[in-house]
Image: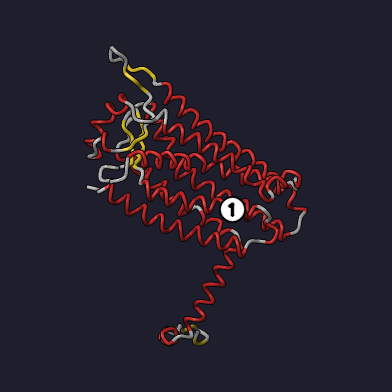
Amino acid sequence: MIDWENSQYAFQIIAAILATISNSLLIYLITHFSPKDIGDYKHLMLFISMFEVVYAMLDLIVQPIFYSFGATFTLIVNTTNSKIDKKFWEIMAMIYCGFFGSSMAIFSLHYVYRYWVITGNSQNLSYFKGRRIFRWLVIPFSIGLIWALVGYFPCYPRKGSSDYLRYGVQEKLSLDIDQIVYFAPYFYEKNDVGEDLIYWPSFVGVCLNSMSINLSMFVVVFYGVKCWNKMRNILTTTSSHLEKNQNQLFYALVAQTIIPIILMHIPALTMFMFSFFELDAGHFSRLVSFSIALFPALDPIPTILIISSYRDAIKKFVQKKCSKFRKTKIGKLLVKAQPKVKCSNGVM
């Protein structure tokens, strides 16, 4: 039988380490090897890398357990053996919800910026210069605040949700509902005669969260398509070097966007739909915890691999280290020990 709790914790540790390494590498590459014509976009790239490092650390600290219990999809923080007050973990879980909600909004800003660069809209681009860029960051932080408040208020534990979850949490997770922190958009509440009624605060809260994510997705798709069309029409008249850089930055952004959609938003949306229709996903829903932890570790990789200046910098670094290693005693022995390959015209 799978030990889900220990497996998840080990996976989150590995994912957090990989996220720190990959994002730190990307931050270094952005600051030292970015194309000269990248402009203020560099600051947006740095921001998202730093965001993902913090997100990975937050995921490791909170260790969220996602589980589907029929009519609700629950975020659980196991505080059974914690000596820290539960209120602290409630706040951490609320912050975690905020980070989840703001992730896609950050990418939407990237698409807006890329479109304005491709169309040469210098007036709008000036709004990203210097300290003005912080005004734009208010957008993802506002959406994150909505997610945090929805998690803390409409989805906060109440008697109806605790009574509904008590048996399932004990049976499936071996946890006491009164000893943990959880947020659950439980959509139903029983009246005095035992009939199920819609609990509107949870319903409205989830609708607000869905609208914020859908708005971010709309901006991503809308400006993504416009970028694609403009690139085909405009960049053919520009220099090959500029065209190459713009193409690479755009494709790297598309790849970076696909990763959280697949690893975060599609799994979470699926579980919310299960809850609304009172379908129990069981242990399958725990995979959401693993996929979300993987997001910040994988997300920097497309940018590192697609943008040639970053890729070449890594290649030169590896070649330099290999060259130094060959000059060492061990390196010389390994080179001499390599077998010679014969071919028809002689020896290779």
Q: Is residue 337 visible?
A: yes
- Report crowding for label 1: few under 14, some 14 to 19, many 20 or more residues within 10 A (C-alpha): many
* Residue in front for this viewpoint, 87 or 136: 87
The image quarter in which residue 202 lies: top left
Q: What is the tally of numbered marks visible in this picture?
A: 1
How far from the left and from the top, in percent, is residue 246?
67, 54
Relative image position of residue 320 (x, y in whole percent) = 54, 77
Indicate the quadrant where residue 248 lies. Answer: bottom right
Is the image coloured rainbow, by chain, by secondary structure, or in one colour? secondary structure
The residue sitting at the right extreme is: 237
Residue 4 position (above or below residue 339): above
Residue 289 vs 169, above or below: the answer is below
Residue 247 vs residue 54: left or right? right
Give the x, y percent position of residue 84.
Answer: 31, 45
Residue at 36 percent across and 55 percent down: it is 13
Q: Amino acid at mark 1?
A: Met
Q: Position of residue 321 (x, y in %)?
A: 50, 76
SS of the residue under disc 1:
helix
The residue shown at (66%, 48%) is 131
Residue 228, visible in the rendered structure: no
Label 1 belongs to which residue?
A: 45
Q: Is residue 196 left or right of residue 296?
A: left
Please state if 239 lies on the left or on the right of 332 as rendered.
right
Residue 267 is drawn in which quadrant? Answer: top left
